[in-house]
Image: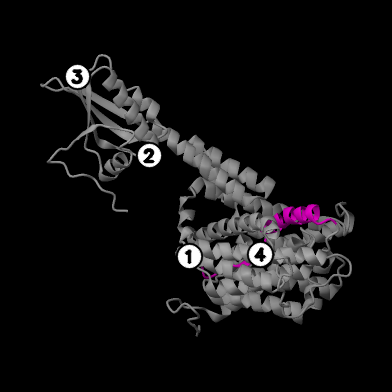
Amino acid sequence: MRKYLNLFDFTQKVDYKTEILSGLTVALALVPEAIAFALIPGFSPLTGLYAAFVLALVTAILGGRPGMISGATGAVAVLFIGLILELKRNFPGIEPEIILNYVFATVIIAGILQILAGVLRLGKFIRLVPHPVMFGFVNGLAIIIFMAQFPNFYQKGTDALLSGGPLYTMLGLTLLTMLIIWGFPKLTKAVPSSLLAIIVVSAIVIGFGIDTLTVADTMKEGESIKGGFPPLSIPQIPLTFETFKIIFPYAGIVAGVGLIESLLTLNIIDEITETRGSGNKECVAQGTANILSGFLSGMGGCAMIGQSLINTSSGARARLSGITAAVMLLVFIMFGSSLIERLPMAALIGLMFMVAIGTFEWASFKTFGKMPKSDVVVMVLVTFITAITHNLAVAVLLGVVISALAYSWENAKRIRARKYIDDKGVKHYEIYGPLFFGSTTAFADKFDVQTDPTEVIIDFRESRVADMSGIEALNKLTERYRKVGKKIHLRHLSKDCKLLLANADEIIDVNVLEDPTYKVVVDKV
């Protein structure tokens, strides 16, 4: 009989076996990624592994999305390259140990900023990310995950691709891993297929003594993942304004990139699991995790979409899987380093290839010819920028900006005016569509000031003045009518529009007519 436990979330049932086995799979997948990301800015493997442990544990307990996995990530790791170069410019001959202290301080400040974002409830703004941007982000990330595996096919310490027997061995073992992950669930889902694939391929390599690349081969000579519990590291840096000026900009970028990637990953996992996570709670959890990571010799990080998808595809839906992954990762560091270092990279490469294939939104190809051209352009552009630059924050922000501009342009073309003269000789302009910065020119072109009668009414029943540009457009229109001695009235303004006009009473002076039978539309949001 299946046993269940309510762990930290008393409204959700937790399947022990699925959560623990899934967590073990994720822990194995975290090892090579954490090592690789630590090596990007030149840190030791343990700096990445400690970060992975702390982030996975804290966000599993406190995060807003059960089942989501956090750890050291490439998006955050590349940011430290700029910080290191900045430190070397300001402090020639600075020691690597001192650089690490600045890195830890940067991670701590980034964590504080992320907590502030959660407290100020800024996580909700991730909802402003359009669907084409989400498609582009996911597709770009899938390409990054896929391409990141190819350096493992190089000969150790060189840029030369493996050839002959070693290459065929790697390819064969990788394909075997992918085949097991794809085929085993068709037989049974009692054990996560990812974990089974790693075990089977590792057993074949170790049992038959096959000469192939292992986890140990991904590290520099003399380095190891063996270590103890993350040591306390209080950053030893000068507490001066100059120091703050150096690290604060990087802390802000780390915080922003980390939150964008984490919240987008949260949305993706929400869609997969058909549940709803808390963005603001995740912001606080990410911040807390990064603060602790900085104090425990970790390089910081954020949510990891690859490992999160491994976890959810294995059936994990609760916090226990993330906790298990973190604890097992620490066990590997403290007691199982010699065994983990013998794992064949082919097994982990095959796993990540399958993650990349599962991550890519293949359905996005069906949208070509069905979605507006602007959406297709945004999706392709975000995919391209994400895949080429690996800068997820810039890709997403650029996609949002372009989507907003495209939306504004479309709305700007929708403003219309129905014109008629009543029996009293008053000309009416019934406006349709929003009056905002994008539509002011089209709005102004609707009026024939010279030939209009002496009294004009502009009816906003089907429109609204949205911003200061709309106010200024009304101001200019008023001046045009005033110069020729004609009177202009505004009718059916919503309450928020009248508030805008009241705030702009020094800019515009118009006579606002009210219709006693018309109820003013007021936003309820």
Q: Cβ–Cβ below 8 Å for labels 1 and 3?
A: no
The numbered mark, 4 or 2, whose residue comes first in the sequence reads 4
Secondary structure state at the residue bearing disc 1 = helix
The residue pinned by badge 3 equals: 454
Mark 4, residues whose alpha carbon is within 10 Å: few (<14), some, or many (≥20)? many
Residue matched to label 2: 467
Query: How far apart are the two marked residues, 2 and 3, measured between alpha carbons?
Result: 28 Å
Judge from the rendering whether residue 34 lies leftward or rightward of residue 426; answer left or right.
right
The residue at the far top in this view is 451
Mark 4 → mark 3, Cα distance in angstroms: 67 Å
Residue 152: image x %, image y %? Answer: 80, 58
Q: Could you tell me which residue is drawn at 32 percent across and 36 percent down?
A: 506
Q: Which amino acid does label 1 sit on?
A: Val
User: Residue 89 vs residue 502: left or right?
Assistant: right
Tag 4 and tag 3, C-beta contact below 8 Å: no
Rendering quarter of residue 214:
bottom right
State yes or no: discs 2 and 3 in contact (Cβ < 8 Å): no
Which residue range is magenta in the image? 65-92
Dividing the picture into quadrants, the one containing residue 435 is top left
**CA distance for labels 4 and 1:** 18 Å
Confirm or deny contact between disc 4 and disc 2 (CB under 8 A). no
Of the pair 208 and 370, the residue shown nearer to us:
370
Q: Mark 1 points at which residue?
A: 119
Answer yes or no: do the residues labelled 4 and 1 have beta carbons within 8 Å? no
Whichever of callouts 4 and 3 sits on the residue coming sooner in the sequence is 4
**Residue drawn at 16 percent across, 41 percent down:** 518
The image quadrant of residue 510 is top left
Compute the Cα span from label 1 to label 3. 56 Å
Sequence-wise, the earlier of marks 1 and 2 is 1
